[in-house]
Image (spheres, grey):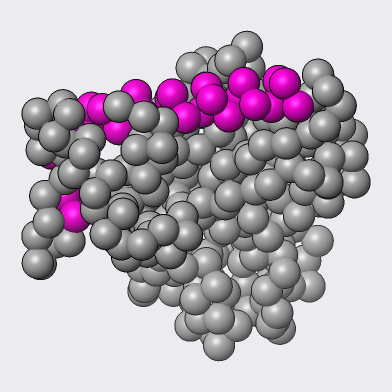
Amino acid sequence: MTIARFEVFTKVVELGSFTKAAEALNMTQSAVSHAVAGLESEWGSTLLIRDRKQGLILTEIGQKTLVHMREILSRMDKIKQEVAFASNLEAGTIRIGSFESASACLLPKIISRFQQKHPNIEFVFYEGTADEILEWLQTGVIDIGFVVLGKHETKMHLVRLVRDRIVGVLPKGHPQEKHETISIHDLQAEPFIMPKGSYRAQVERILEQAGITPRIRFEVLDTNTIGSMIQEGLGVTIGPELMFKKQPGIHLGQLREVNWRCLSLACPSIACASPAVQAFLSGAKSCYDSNE
C-alpha cells in the first residue's frame, strides 16, 4: 500500500477513465491499471467495476476507502505545505468548488490578489451546483467551496463574503423599467420563467410569502439561457443579482420586497486546513470586508 497508488486511484475516479488518468499523471495506461489492480490485490477487495454502459462504478468498499484515501492525500499535501511555508518556500495546491455566479463575479478578484502574494500556489477548480459543492466538501474532493448560507452554516468554518440582492429580471424596455423600484405583485400577470437551479427554493419561498402563484411559462436550469429568453421578451423572473448583472439586454429592477442570499467560502475545519487554504480564506475575507 503506497501513497502513489492512492493518487492513481483517486485520479481514475475523479476523471472516470484509466486513459484520462494516465494522461493527467503522465503515466502509461498499463501502469495506471497495474496500480489499481495492485491496490485491489493487496486489500483482497474489488474497488472499481468497469461497465460498458455506465463506465467506471465504485463498489461499496471503493466508496468507503476513497474518502480515507483523499483524506490521507490531503494530509500529505498539508505536511508538504507546512514544511515549505516554514522554509519560506511556498508550495501546494488548493482545490476550489464554485458555482456559476461565484466563478464569474467573486473568484477572479480573490485569486488575483492571492497570487500577488503567493504566486507558487496552484489551483484546481470544480464547478457544480450548491448541493454538489457541499457533498464535495464533506467527502474531501475539494478544500474550499462557495456556499449559500442556510441550514449548513454551523457545520463548517465559514468566511462570509457578500450579500447578493434578489432582483426582478425584465427585458429592456419593459414598462416597469421606468420605476425606481418594483413589486413582485407587478409581475404577477407576466409569463414567468422559473429557475430549476439551486436558488429555485428561495424564489418559491419569496413568491409564497408574497401570496403569488406565478404564471410559469418555462422552467430552465441555465442562467444564461434564462437571461437570453428574457431578452427576447419570453417572460420575466426574479433571482440573485450576481447571476444576471453581466447579461446584456435585460433590466434588473430593485424589488420592494427586500430579500438577500449570503455567499460565503466554506471549509470543513480551519484547524485542519493547510497553510495555503488558511491564507486563501484570510485573503478572501480581506477582499470583501467592506461588504460586511
Seen from the viewer's position, the closer of residues 231 and 106 is: 106
Task: Determine the residue positioned at 51% across, 54% down.
Answer: 127
Left or right: 104, with 5 as reference point: right
Left or right: 53, with 254 as reference point: left
Range covered by the magenta-colored residues: 56-84
Q: Quadrant of the C terminus?
A: top right
Q: Quadrant of the N terminus?
A: top left
What x and y, as percent, mark residue 77? Answer: 58, 29
Q: Hey, which quadrant is residue 17 in on the image?
A: bottom left
Seen from the viewer's position, the closer of residues 17 and 84 is: 84
Task: Determine the residue positioned at 56% across, 33% down.
Answer: 143
Q: Hey, which quadrant is residue 135 in on the image?
A: top left
Residue 78: tell me if it is visible: yes
Task: Determine the residue positioned at 61% across, 24% down.
Answer: 78
Residue 235 lies in the magenta-colored region: no
Main SS of the magenta segment?
Answer: helix
